[in-house]
């Protein structure tokens, strides 16, 4: 087995390592979400952490890792005798794959025992395996929402409740939950973000020297993994001892009233929802004090805990970037400090994550940058902004859901297809999660194996079964019933020509598109963007789940030049063709924002209408947003809508609230 990359050898990323260690010291903090661009060694650091966790003593033969000194009273493998036969093993790192099913996560009917013994027994899932260890979810934003809900509920309660396949089980599930994600691939819902205790933004270092150090260590590791790990074993062992010592010290750390007042003042000042932020910040501050070897929480512990616990809880709309104003934070901490309290050291460094410095064999001490990948500067190292008035905690950013967004939903609902996971509306059929099993009414199309076995298992003795295997009758057969949410591919086709730049049309177009992006975010759609101007069309945003990226590309959209409308429509048809090959079940919806004028080529208008007809024959539903304004109107956009077989709305209509009567179901798609 190849040795894991050592935690101490990671270059940079102090905040990331500190957040992981805080959770290792006190798992009740609630886990950590690592957000960052691809290639920043998020997975490498998480895997390296598992080797630092103390060994766990478990009752021998218990599949749920019960502790010999305090076994779970409701353990499915119990009851266990206190002080019974025990063994010691390393803390587990359990990885949850993106394609995991619900029964793999929470467990299900033990098919082997059902087939061989004819009994209903429970087969533990990944939550049980992760108990008293680390549960690592790479690309957590790509998991289905209901699986993320299951994980976070278990992490918050420390217990997993299983009611499925005729099995009713409760077992302990206390683990360090670590999720990683690339924001370009889509965001988690704010409700799910809030359930992660801490979050860290990870970015690659822009310092050539530090990047060179990262590359050199990685090459050395790949050349000799065992030798590289052995060279850093001393530093890793010192960190492991320090984590164990901090865990021992944790129950004795005092969170005094002044520190608690600072915690609650910070959470109130930054206008976070609910009280989970206060609890997480308090727990993280206590863990930081234990990690630093202190017996009481200080203002700096509160400061660092807030920098890790609050940024992702301040988002007020999908396009807000996580963040916290450090100058405002220092001011709030100073105001909340009592007359006898020590003022918080603004801009203080985070607690060190290293062991004692060493200069052996020419290496840097472990407190110097760590990273198998890249680094993000420590929040404590960020220079405070210049003096200014206190930044307001901010009012929720409100965007009205416009008529076009509602039309998009109606349009999507009119397309007959088996949609992938999304939130356009409830759908049954494949795909989707299995919600129950039923007897087939006709020919069996798919077999729900566990439900079938569970139905047949109680009757095996009566049916005279002898030996392994199971006797099935047709009445035992069950088929799955699946349910999910529809999802669209919303492709924005934006006219960025000179005529659109006139009369401030482009500003109104961007506002309308932003509102549609909000709707796409709420409904878990994939979004893409094609623009056309000058001599051709360009895919400025390939289809993605990240509407944040779409909003950023929209804000930076240049305008000017002629209007190659036909080129834009043909490029849109090509994008949909490629996406259909990747995911044939996703419903395509084209939102064309244009004044309809085509000025590129001899028969520009005719070419545009023919391109529109070609796009319509591809099976895509369409909405045309008529951006024409002024006293003279050519009425070209409605002609495009007819050619596309779609709905046409005027741009000024999109600013009105009381126009729901204009929304009409789009007609059936043309045959290809």
Image: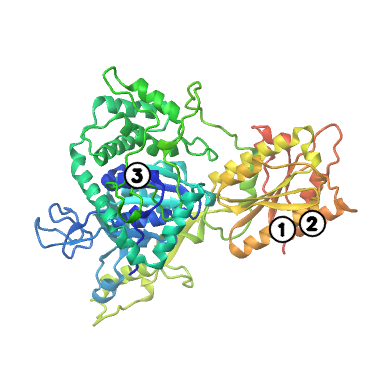
Asked which secondary structure carries label 2, the reply is helix
Proximity of marks 3 and 2: CB atoms separated by less than 8 Å: no
Q: Earlier in the sequence, mark 1 or mark 3?
A: 3
Horizontal and vertical percent position of residue 252: 18, 37
- What residue would you read off at disc 1? 573
With respect to residue 442, does 659 lie above or below? Answer: above
| Residue lying at the far top of the rendered structure | 339
Q: Where is residue 416 in the image (x, y as percent from the top left)?
A: 62, 58
Residue 54 relative to residue 657: left or right: left
Horizontally, is 644 left or right of 80 in the view?
A: right
**Mark earlier in primary sequence (2, 1):** 1
Q: Residues within 10 Å of mark 3 (few under 14, many from 20)?
A: many
The one nearer the camera, 407 or 618, is 618
Q: Earlier in the sequence, mark 3 or mark 2?
A: 3
Q: Name the one closer to the observer, 234 or 100.
A: 234
Please name the residue that numbered disc 3 is placed on: 18
Q: Mark 2 points at which residue?
A: 611
Q: Where is residue 194 in the image (x, y as percent from the top left)?
A: 40, 41
Q: How many numbered marks does the figure carry? A: 3
The quarter of the displayed image where residue 92 is located: bottom left
């Amino acid at each position: 087995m190849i040795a894991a990359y050592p935690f101490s050898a990671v270059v940079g990323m102090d905040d990331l390592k500190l957040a992981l260690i805080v959770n290792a010291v006190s798992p009740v903090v609630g886990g950590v979400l690592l957000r960052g661009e691809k290639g920043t060694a998020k997975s490498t650091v998480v895997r390296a952490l598992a080797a630092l966790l103390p060994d766990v003593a478990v009752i021998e033969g218990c599949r749920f890792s019960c502790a010999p000194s305090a076994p779970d009273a409701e353990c499915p493998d119990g009851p266990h005798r206190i002080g019974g036969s025990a063994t010691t093993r390393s803390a587990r790192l359990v990885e949850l794959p993106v394609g995991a099913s619900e029964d793999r996560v929470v467990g299900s009917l033990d098919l082997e025992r059902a087939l061989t013994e004819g009994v209903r027994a429970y087969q533990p899932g990944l939550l049980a395996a992760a108990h008293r260890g680390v549960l690592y979810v790479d690309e957590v934003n790509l998991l289905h929402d209901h699986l993320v809900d299951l994980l976070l509920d278990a992490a918050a309660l420390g217990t997993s409740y299983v009611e499925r396949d005729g099995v009713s089980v409760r077992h302990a599930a206390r683990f360090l939950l670590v999720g990683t994600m690339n924001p370009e691939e889509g965001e988690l819902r704010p409700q799910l973000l809030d359930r992660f205790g801490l979050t860290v933004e990870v970015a690659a270092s822009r310092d050539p020297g530090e990047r060179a150090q990262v590359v050199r260590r990685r090459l050395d590791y790949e050349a000799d993994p065992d030798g590289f790990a052995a060279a850093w074993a001393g530093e890793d062992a010192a960190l492991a001892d320090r984590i164990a010592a901090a865990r021992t010290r944790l129950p004795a750390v005092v969170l005094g009233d002044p520190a608690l007042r600072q915690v609650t003042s910070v959470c109130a000042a930054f206008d976070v929802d609910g009280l989970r932020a206060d609890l997480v910040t308090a727990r993280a501050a206590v863990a930081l004090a234990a990690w630093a070897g202190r017996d009481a929480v200080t203002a700096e512990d509160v400061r660092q805990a807030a920098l890790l616990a609050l940024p992702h809880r301040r988002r007020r709309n999908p396009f807000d970037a996580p963040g916290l104003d450090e100058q405002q934070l220092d001011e709030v901490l100073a105001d909340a400090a009592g007359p006898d309290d020590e003022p918080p050291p603004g801009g203080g460094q985070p607690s060190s994550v290293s062991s004692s410095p060493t200069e052996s064999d020419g290496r840097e001490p472990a407190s110097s940058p760590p990273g198998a990948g890249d680094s993000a500067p420590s929040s404590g190292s960020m220079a405070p902004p210049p003096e200014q008035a206190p930044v307001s905690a901010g009012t929720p950013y409100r965007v009205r859901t416009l008529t076009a967004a509602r039309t998009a939903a109606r349009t999507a609902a009119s397309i007959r297809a088996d949609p992938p996971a999304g939130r356009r509306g409830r759908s049954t059929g494949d795909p989707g999660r299995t919600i129950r099993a039923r007897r087939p009414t006709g020919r069996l199309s798919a077999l729900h194996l566990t439900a079938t076995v569970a139905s047949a298992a109680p009757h095996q003795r009566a049916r005279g079964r002898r030996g392994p295997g199971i006797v099935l009758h047709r009445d035992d057969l069950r088929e799955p019933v699946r349910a999910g949410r529809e999802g669209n591919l919303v492709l924005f086709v934006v006219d960025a020509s000179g005529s659109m730049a006139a009369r401030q049309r482009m500003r109104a177009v961007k506002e309308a598109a932003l509102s549609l992006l909000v709707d796409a975010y709420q409904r878990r759609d994939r979004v893409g963007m094609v623009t056309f101007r000058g001599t051709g069309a360009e895919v400025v945003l390939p289809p993605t789940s990240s509407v944040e990226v779409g909003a950023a590309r929209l804000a930076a959209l240049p305008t000017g030049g002629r209007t190659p409308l036909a080129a834009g429509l043909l490029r849109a048809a090509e994008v949909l063709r490629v996406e259909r090959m990747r995911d044939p079940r996703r419903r395509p919806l084209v939102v064309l924002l244009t004044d309809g004028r085509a000025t590129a080529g001899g028969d520009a208008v005719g070419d545009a209408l023919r391109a529109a007809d070609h796009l319509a024959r591809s099976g895509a539903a369409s909405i045309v947003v008529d951006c024409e304004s002024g006293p003279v109107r050519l009425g070209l956009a409605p002609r495009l809508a007819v050619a596309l077989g779609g709905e046409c709305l005027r741009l000024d209509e999109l600013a009105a609230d009381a126009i729901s009567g204009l929304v009409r179901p789009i007609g059936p798609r043309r045959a290809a």
